[in-house]
Image: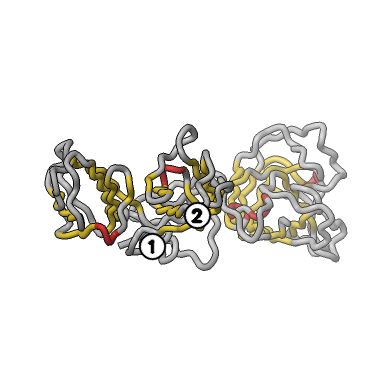
Amino acid sequence: MAYLGVDPNVGDITFQKFTGTGSATSFTLSQNVASGEAILVTVGNVLQEPGVTASYIAQGTTLTFSEAPANGDDIVVRFLGRAVDQPLSFAMQLFKYVATANQTAFTGADSAGAILAFGSDVDVYLNGVHLDTTDFTLSGGDTVTLASGATVNDELVIRAFRAFAATDTVSKASGGTFSGGVSMGSTLSVTGTSTFTGAITSSGGIKLGGTASTNLLNNYVNDGTWSPYFSNITGDAIFNETPAIQAGTYQRVGDYVYLNAYLKNAASVTTTSSYSASSGTYIGGLPFAVPSGNTNFHAGSVGYQVQLVGGYDSTNLSVPITLITEASRSVLRMSYPLGVTTSQVLNSYVGNNTGLIFSINYKVT
């Protein structure tokens, strides 16, 4: 059986004793209590009534009497429950009997018709005076027998306690299993290794290794699509027309992103104000910018190129194009290998139907 909180302790109700001084009204309890109703207090074997207008109040570990108990009076506190770390819950029922002459045994229905039943813990009061356990005996879980016969019309009060533990709970100390969903209203802290057999869903994201936004899990593993186009170094499009083919995919894993794309201009293009024939050509629209101050440039390769003017060697053979990252930019520079007359692809080389299929990976943080 599992329990939420401390596992149940089986045994008698805990009690504490004090001695009155005639002046002290405040006493320190050994356990936390939620209120005066969580304890039974007797002074000189007389049961006291809890409440701000009655005999005493209690909260936390402080018991306060409205009047100081007399010097030498025995004060007994019985704990029915605690505000924090309560091991048991108690069901308490009150039975009242009006005695006949010399009656000793009290059982069955009381004056209100309630049938007496109890566990191992009871408090017995005769005309308001708490009886010592030597003044009565218990038998069968349903009978209280006085050592001396009562007087006619004496009132016998029996407080019967039965400890129980909630069955559908999980132990704080020993752990257990929740069969249904669990909702947390605040932060859930976990120490040690956690095992999940189902999917983890989080509307606010999941962070790894820290609390910064860069620690979000979707910054570690993330994939999607992007739309490449021919641009200048600041990412402004150099053609007015939307490319005929503009298909890009990416996958980010940790600090690196892997790009693949097929870019092809429309059959007829016109230039924008960002176009300059003598300026270098770039590919804009990267899903992740290259960080500022990043001196680790990364190069990608073009596997296919069509309708690209220029970029030929001395034998008039087409030279492969290399794509290079630019620090603090969301563009790729189109360049030629060393040894070619022009090291960078110029805008004048790009026009109608110019197409590229390329891939590159680069660092994003």
**Residue nearest the viewer, comparing 328 with 344:** 328
Q: Is residue 96 above or below residue 208?
A: above
Q: The N terminus is located in which quarter?
A: bottom left
Q: Is residue 346 above or below residue 197?
A: above
> In the rendering, which numbered label is found on residue 280?
none
Residues at badges 2 and 1 in contact (C-beta under 8 Å)? no
Q: How is the image coloured?
A: secondary structure
**Residue nearest the viewer, comparing 54 with 188:** 54
Return the residue at label 1.
7
SS of the residue under disc 1: loop
**Is residue 226 found left or right of 339 in the rendered image?**
left
Residue 304 in sight in this render: no
For the residue carrying disc 2, how many other residues have a C-alpha within 10 Å: few (<14), some (14-19), or many (20+)? few
Please provide percent x and percent y for residue 349: 78, 47
For the residue carrying disc 1, how many other residues have a C-alpha within 10 Å: few (<14), some (14-19), or many (20+)? some
At a point 58% along the width and 57% down the height, the residue shown is 221
**Residue nearest the viewer, comparing 222 with 309:** 222
- The disc labelled 1 sits on which kind of residue? Asp
Q: Is residue 123 above or below residue 191?
A: above
- The disc labelled 2 sits on which kind of residue? Gly
At a point 75% along the width and 53% down the height, the residue shown is 290
**Is residue 64 found left or right of 42 in the rendered image?**
right
Return the residue at label 2.
72
Please provide percent x and percent y for residue 292: 82, 52
Residue 195 in sight in this render: yes
Q: Earlier in the sequence, mark 2 or mark 1?
A: 1
**Is residue 47 found left or right of 363 in the rendered image?**
left
SS of the residue under disc 2: loop
Q: The C terminus is located in which quarter?
A: bottom right
Q: CA distance from mark 2 to mark 1?
A: 38 Å
Please provide percent x and percent y for residue 205: 56, 48
Please provide percent x and percent y for residue 27: 55, 51
